[in-house]
Image: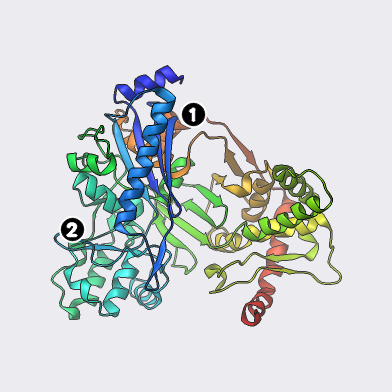
Amino acid sequence: MNNLDAKTTIETGKAILGIEFGSTRIKAVLIDQNNKPIAQGSHEWENQLINGLWTYSIEDIWAGLQDCYADLRDNVNKLYCTEICKLASIGISAMMHGYMAFDKSQNILVPFRTWRNTNTGKAAAELSKLFNFNIPLRWSISHLYQAILNNEEHVKDIDFLTTLAGYIHWQITGKRVLGIGDASGMLPIDSAINNYSESMVNKFNKLITPYGYKWTLLDILPKVLLAGEDAGTLTEIGAKKIDLSGHLQAGTPVCPPEGDAGTGMTATNAIRKRTGNVSAGTSSFSMIVLEKALSKPYEVIDMVTTPDGSPVAMVHCNNCTSDLNAWIGLFKEYQELMGLPVDMNDIYGKLYNNALKGDADCGGLLSFNYISGEPVTGFTDGRPLFVRSANDKFTLANFVRAHLYGSVGVLKIGNDILFKQEHIKVDKITGHGGLFKTKGVGQRILAAALNSPISVMETAGEGGAWGVAILASYLVNNAEKQSLADFLDKYVFADYSSEEIAPTKEEVVGFDAYIENYKQALPIEQAAVEHKA
């Protein structure tokens, strides 16, 4: 689409807006009728540690949204010499989980408790046992029950409990609703009814009966909606909360608010059953869309859903490429010391591609990338560690390859449960994130780790903000009443190319050998953690 077409799209009110609140950046993406980005805006922000809990203030939330939207308006003006007045639809997304509790007057009762907080251990353990379902520390129900166990005074006054995306949506539409993917991070979802699990709701209500609260769980939780369902429209008050200039008009349909996991699945076309995606950067996670529920709960696997309600097995790892990047930085320093020109893309490219010449099992070398703790392997703290014995094949190729393996080693351990114990089948996994920047290398490493073909998409999209814009498009541009997966295939990704790499048998066997050595050496990492200065 040329600038004139984009300008016409904006001026005729056919553009669609997606806004996502990430942990360090709020991002806005404006897309056209063909779901292609035509303008962007952003705002950088940081969480604060207050009284031992990670939070963002209400003031920062709204100031960030307004600055992000103002940046979008400025860019639209620079690119197209026009103003955003009317939109076809809007979508709001944010980091999942956490705890935002409000009273009847819409006052927040305690500062927003984000997903980063880990003070919910007792609650999560008790609920996991009660529900026979893995309840992570960061889920909203864990935060709520921990507040109850702590006898926090505010709990009796709760009128509404929601996530960050649900809060923004409520304030701009007046609707107390939540997309099913985001809701699945508040309380487990029963995909047979596309709603909160009735048995778990009943068990929780019975559990808290002795406390004598006037509310029950469904009284305070948002209504669950599927992608494409009516979630309300932008109110006059909501328009003013977003656009301080006053140009944005009310009446725009707003899609069900979603979490960043759901928008990530949407942006990588990983909604259909037997598909998945892996995000690999500073941290990593995999999302595999299941055909049916797992046979039993696993502590290292979180069960959430797609935006249209299919069950998803999520493996989340705290560490991924940070230690690898630190080692690559040493090679940069060496190059500078030698007075050679420094091009980081060239350094990464040469070292990564050379790593593919190494032994499939890395010659016995091991890398533990634990900048911080790693729950999947049971570590509450970490220390980066490189391990070798005198007889290992200590070459540059094996050294870098070991660190590439180490960046996704924990992810493999979690996914081995799915593929080797639960015998989950996948047709396609899409990789995205910094690990895949050097073409073909991270992709091949991950393919060997998961024993599955990995695709990397050449997409013009911009992550979660683009993903929620697509969900907003699905709300208003789905006259054929197609499933979300069919809509994505036909109207979003038909023109996007992707490259798929399948692992060789030698690579799979080699990574399996590496990970067995890795697991046997975990006590070395534990000793390093216990005795570090």
Does the image show residue 194? no
Q: Is residue 439 left or right of residue 482?
A: right
Q: Residue at x 20, y 34 (%)?
A: 251
Q: Position of residue 7 (x, y in %)?
A: 38, 21
Residue 106's tag is: 2
In the rendered image, which quarter contains the C terminus?
bottom right
Q: Amino acid at mark 2?
A: Gln
**x%, y% of residue 505?**
72, 51
Q: Residue type at mark 1? A: Ala
Quick one: label 2, few (<14), some, or many (20+) residues within 10 Å? few
Residue at figure coordinates x 47%, y 69% from the top left = 299
Q: Residue at x 67, y 61 (%)?
A: 406
**Residue 497 or 368: which is nearer the viewer?**
368
Query: Can residue 61 be seen in this snapshot?
Result: yes
Q: Nearer the viewer, residue 108 or 93?
A: 108
Q: Position of residue 21 (x, y in %)?
A: 39, 50
How many angstroms separate mark 2 from mark 1 (CA)?
44 Å
Front position among marks 2 and 1: 2
Q: Position of residue 369 (x, y in %)?
A: 64, 64
Identify the colour scheme used: rainbow
Q: Quadrant of residue 98?
A: bottom left
Instruction: Report the disc number at residue 494.
Output: 1
Q: Secondary structure at mark 2?
A: loop
Q: Are marks 2 and 1 in contact (CB under 8 Å)?
A: no
Residue closer to the observer: 305 or 273: 305
From what the image shows, is residue 183 above or below residue 439?
A: below
